[in-house]
Image (spheres, coloured by chain):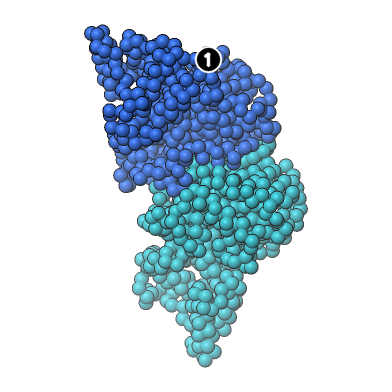
Chain colours: A blue, B cyan
Amino acid sequence: MTRLWNDPQRFVDEMIDGFALANAGYVRKVRGGVTRSTRSPEPGPSLVIGGGSGHYPAFAGLVGPGLAHGAAMGNLFASPSTTQIESVIRASDRGDGVLLSYGNYAGDVLNFTAAQEAVRADGIDCRTVLVTDDIFSAPPDARDTRRGIAGDLTVFKIAGAAAEEGRSLDEVERVARQGNERTRSMGVAFTGCTLPGADEPLFSVPEGRMAVGLGIHGEPGIDETDIPTAEGLAELFVEHLLSPGEIPDGVTIDGARCVPILNGLGSVKSEELFVVYRSLALLLGERGVTLVDPQVGEFCTSFDMAGASLTLLWVDDELEGLWTAAADTPAFRRGSVTALPPADRSPDADVLDDTGAAVPEASADSRRAAERIEAVLAAIDATADRSAAEWGHLDSVAGDGDHGIGMRRGASAAREAASAALAEGAGARTVLERAAAAWADRAGGTSGALWGVILRSLATQLSDTARPTAAQVVAGVDEGRHAVMRVGGAELGDKTMVDALVPFADTLAQRVGEGAPSPAPGPTRRTPPRAEPSRRQR
Amino acid sequence: MTRLWNDPQRFVDEMIDGFALANAGYVRKVRGGVTRSTRSPEPGPSLVIGGGSGHYPAFAGLVGPGLAHGAAMGNLFASPSTTQIESVIRASDRGDGVLLSYGNYAGDVLNFTAAQEAVRADGIDCRTVLVTDDIFSAPPDARDTRRGIAGDLTVFKIAGAAAEEGRSLDEVERVARQGNERTRSMGVAFTGCTLPGADEPLFSVPEGRMAVGLGIHGEPGIDETDIPTAEGLAELFVEHLLSPGEIPDGVTIDGARCVPILNGLGSVKSEELFVVYRSLALLLGERGVTLVDPQVGEFCTSFDMAGASLTLLWVDDELEGLWTAAADTPAFRRGSVTALPPADRSPDADVLDDTGAAVPEASADSRRAAERIEAVLAAIDATADRSAAEWGHLDSVAGDGDHGIGMRRGASAAREAASAALAEGAGARTVLERAAAAWADRAGGTSGALWGVILRSLATQLSDTARPTAAQVVAGVDEGRHAVMRVGGAELGDKTMVDALVPFADTLAQRVGEGAPSPAPGPTRRTPPRAEPSRRQR
């Protein structure tokens, strides 16, 4: 379990501070994560990686010459927000385009994709290669939908080495994709991890048992067995990773060259991993595989979870050269890398911060509507505050238990941003835009991004000058519904927020079409709310 | 707890195999540990480190250019044997002398010192610098008696860098000593570790509590508190390590330069360490200390123990240069090191193995005495076999619980070596010499070394030609008693084997002096033992 923290809510921020202080020769903190602190000798494409925190050295420990240029760092096990990712991209861009690479998880895909679109709009050539190495998360014919685990390292390393060589973005993208095609992983776990401040582990495995194929956040595996011997575990790894469906196209096992990465997830120690590695080396050798530059240690952890994974990267000459190229980062160093001088920079050049932007002029009508919007957001905030514990409990059954915390952070940030904009005289559209950005940024994860999408969609139908019409609100909600389905990829019946959003949008449209009065957004701030008063109302 | 092993008895051997397989570019396995597999460009002195296993990356993970030349690897938490250390010294020697450096523990001191004497006898200039960084193991005025913990790394790194620069052995010894003078550490622990195959942790700390000053094998600390916040732990570290008695001569805190090493002992994860490091950096900065090249991670672990330690190396210009010099080892890499080609070697050149040596010719009288000696060793072996569980239980109260296993390994090896020598026609002296070497080598640790000393002392008084006299046996036992006290440093009443050995030697001398019949060594192999038959008698 985790023992050392101050305030669990500040854990990740303080962790990033400490990481950047201890590794100032490699990285500097920017909004949303870290970027290299060293000067890059040549222009060229940049590699930006990232994901939730709690997997060190993934992701920030892999930033430095020969590897990544920047890492977006979300909350514990939660995707970084779109704004955070966008900030890290802008800070890491060297003018020749950016490759985004990260493990295939819904929240990450959503936020990285939105950030990619945002920077593309500014002319940055931005591409994505997802890591999909975990063989137990989907069958071979659905490889694209697999999640990413410790195979992150091989894809990042290959792309980072190609970028360091000065290859074009096209080339960096190509080899990263080839690296992912050639990478397969599987993991096992003995215990779950306990996040800072939590009372219970995120998941549990019965004493003396081993979960096979479990994901790094406790996503279900395929099997549960008694804990095998070290040799038995090596046999299990080899059996699954060398099964015919998992051998990449163009690879023949006998005679192949392969990089093995035996990864500890947190509490399985190096000594145990070396005993397992001994058997792995023997077994793979018997199959005619030549092992290249093996890695045994911690590369993608899950806090203090007891578990291990094996990743195999089946190399050709090009991939082997890129894998073995020099790199120098806080957690992964190899070969001959000359220390680089610190980069010149203006301290705030890379911090995205629009709170200083002026609020556009607004009409009295639109400001009155904005007050109503603020009241709706206050009611949502009060509901989130009241319901956070229950939502967290529900989510701990289905997911990682952070939904209550995320909703509370998002709703509270949205309400505060709306109040601040209103105080500056903002109209309906600007208040909603500010609330959308704040929610997505502070909540992070999948639902934070989707709430940002809903509020932003609504904003696009309103203005800062005219009183919103009922038809505009209906169109905004409808646009939000379609945007959520488009961005999140969920359909009606998938048991997501779409199941509530679709009937709401339909009913609203129907009632307004039937001539119902314009939907009342609830009381303004000048009259007490009819709903139960918010405990956080100031 | 530890989950992955095959046979706990083979754990360390298999661990070393796996480690050497995974790091063939750095090390090769030799008897007793590992030595560099790379060719050293210049002749020069060598650095040999070592200790018990279970502390990875200490010690084998620190072998490579810019750091150590070889590491002697004992059993889990047990000193390597004299023979193992001697073998690693001989394999690592480059012809310009050898510096031994290791943490100050009784078993290590005993075995490293004996190995040092053995190689000195062959003309190798061999010196020793003990690491004594743990401030809670003795008061400041008894610094020399303190034990070594994560400060190992600073002393090894400084000595290794000096050797890499091509400095003389005198110089390497001087800077290593200076490094140890300038290094202070303290540790805390939340839980103990469980060794492979053990049912219970080596020690335990009550839930929610933190042991302060606990050693890395569970040696008692000075205090127990509730688990503090991350900031509170940083304050505790700084309070103790910056107390006046702990500031090295010549250092003024305000304006000093200092390398901080925040070390996780096994199950405390990087994310937690970074949160603690953030507070440490602030607190040390407030005191006017400039932090140089901080290290946050695992450098000296205690298997999966949950705990952390802080080491401070107070540098001057020379030490800072040596600390920050390039190094390239399996677990510690920095700066620009060009990969070196593999060394040429004859495969068995470094393996000490005297089993092939011819047995000196012996008289019939001496061979009869040798048979009696073998019978005594068989009786000891039977007793050890029968009593191993009880001895282990007693030792788990006072020490690390491995005494039964060690005695059994040693007694069994001694009996087998004696039988083999006897079968080749050895006399009394040779049989005892072979038994002594086998016991010390296979048992390891402190008691293994001391049993080797006892048997070897007895051997020096006997010959392979004459029948031993009672007076010679008395003299041999007396010599053994004095040798154990000299080598082990214990006095009568210190609750060691000396408390049994002294009255035994005295009584034996007295009875023989009174004209008692020559002490009977028990039945020979040709008559059944009067004592309870050994379960292992073949």
* Chain bearing mark 1: A
**Residue type (three-letter) at the residue carrying disc 1:** Arg
**x then y, percent, for residue A530:** 28, 28
Q: Position of residue A356 (x, y in %)?
A: 55, 24
Residue B34 placed where, x, y %? 58, 49
| Circle 1 SS class | helix
Q: Which residue is mark 1?
A: A120
Closer to us: B213 or B152: B213
Identified at 40% across, 70% down, the residue is B383
The residue depicted at 38 percent of the width and 17 percent of the height is: A369
Residue at position x 57%, y 57% in the image? B239
Looking at this view, is A140 or A132 the one in front? A132
The residue carrying pointer 1 sits among few (fewer than 14), some (14 to 19) or many (20 or more) residues within 10 Å by Cα, namely some
Question: Quadrant of the rendered structure where residue A293 is?
Answer: top right
- Residue nearer the viewer, B5 or B83: B5
| Most distant residue in the bottom direction | B514
Q: Is residue B125 above or below residue B382?
A: above
Quadrant of the rendered image containing residue B363: bottom right
**Res. A122 in view:** yes
Horizontal relation, residue B4 to residue B151: left or right: left
Counting the numbered discs, the total is 1
Q: Observer-nearest residue: A382 or A210?
A: A382
Q: Residue at x 35, y 73 (%)?
A: B532
Placement of the C terminus of chain A among the 4 image quadrants: top left
Taking the image as drawn, is residue A437 in sight? no
Q: Which x, y percent locates residue B517?
A: 48, 87
